Image (cartoon, helix red, strand yellow):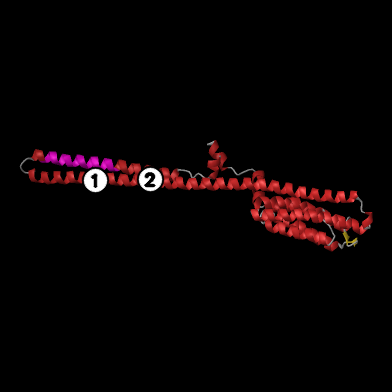
Amino acid sequence: MSAARDDTLPDPWHVRLGQGLTQRPWIIDGGLIALPLTLLSVLSAAQNQGYTFFGGPAPWGLVFALDLLTILPLTVRRMRPAWAAGLIALGALGQILTLVGPGFSAFTVPFVLYSVAKFGSRRASRLYLGVALAGAVLLGLYALVQQLLVLPAYAIRLETLFVVLLMTGFAAAVAMVAWLLGDLAGRRRREIAAITERNELLERERDHETRLAADAERMRIAREMHDVVSHSMSVMIAQADGGRYVVAQDPQAAAGAFETIGRTGREALTEMRRMLGVLREERESLLVQPARGWRTWSG
């Protein structure tokens, strides 16, 4: 009684909350990643710190628009990973070409690379990995151009070039690590999906074989019932015809014939009830038998 009562109780609130957030991943991505990055970008753009636009301060509206173009696609990175990666790449390219440069929105790149490697197609995954590596090179060139805008070319030292190369290598390494983690997660996800599909196929085949076996058993019982009824009816007809002829001359023989008719009929009825009982039990077992899904197979 207690076990049955526990099964009917609703899930705890934290379980329902987790299930709801799992079904709506844009809430997590928007609330925990996109919103904080947007607020930080607004503060940075308002203060105009670290932004230059061809040697001068960048317009606040341009900085904020490019940041939004690079941040907001994170909300759909799991549902539409290729679209999100394309929009973020477009926004990052705009930041570099206008010399505004990446701000806090640069943190979106590893997130979207992970998502496109995990949830996207193999073609899109490799394409945007190449885009990210090219973006790392452009980021190094952007840093070099920023130095050239401040210092003359003869004042650029070897240390500056080393820092530019280090920045390029670090950006490429971050992109590669994010892509590798996403690719491993995507492979695991595809393996689980393949196992689930295979288990469901096996379950359908098992149900089909069970139904075929039940149909074959019903056909066998139907043939046996036909044989029992045919044999019993033949005996009963023969005994009835014989009893009709001898009833006047030998009443005792007629009584024996009628007794045989009754016994044969009762035996036939008992046999038919037994076979019908077998059919009924098979039908009830098929109705009561629980359907096993992939969770039963995997668990």
SS state under label 2: helix
Instruction: Kindly check if marks 1 and 2 are in contact, taking CB atoms under 8 A apart as contact.
Output: no
Which disc, if any, is residue 229? Answer: 1
Which mark is first along the chain, 2 or 1?
A: 2
Residue situated in front as seen by the camera: 123 or 240? 123
Residue 63 drawn above or below residue 32: below
Q: Which residues are magenta?
A: 254-272
Answer whether residue 74 is visible to the viewer in this image. no
- Residue 260 x %, y %: 17, 40
Type of amino acid at the residue the image marks with label 2: Ala
**In front here: 58 or 155?**
155
Q: Is residue 138 left or right of residue 253?
A: right
Percent across and percent down for residue 1 are 52, 36
**Cα–Cα span, label 1 and label 2:** 22 Å
- Spot occupied by residue 67 in the image (x, y as percentages of width and height): 80, 58
Q: Which residue is mark 2?
A: 214
Q: Is residue 149 left or right of residue 133?
A: right
Q: Position of residue 287 (x, y in %)?
A: 43, 46
The answer to whether residue 83 of the structure is visible from this angle is yes
**What residue sits 20% from the left and 46% below the top?**
233
Q: Nearer the viewer, residue 237 or 142?
A: 142
Residue 260 in magenta stretch:
yes
Q: Which residue: 54% across, 37% down?
A: 3
Identified at 82% across, 61% down, the residue is: 97
Residue type for callout 1? Val
At a point 5% along the width and 42% down the height, the residue shown is 249
The quarter holding residue 74 reads: bottom right
Q: Residue furthest left?
A: 249
Q: Comparing marks 1 and 2, which lies closer to the viewer?
A: 2
CA neighbours of label 1 inside 10 A, class few (<14), some (14 to 19), many (20+): some
The answer to whether residue 166 is above or below residue 96 is above
Check disc 1 and report its element: helix, strand or loop: helix
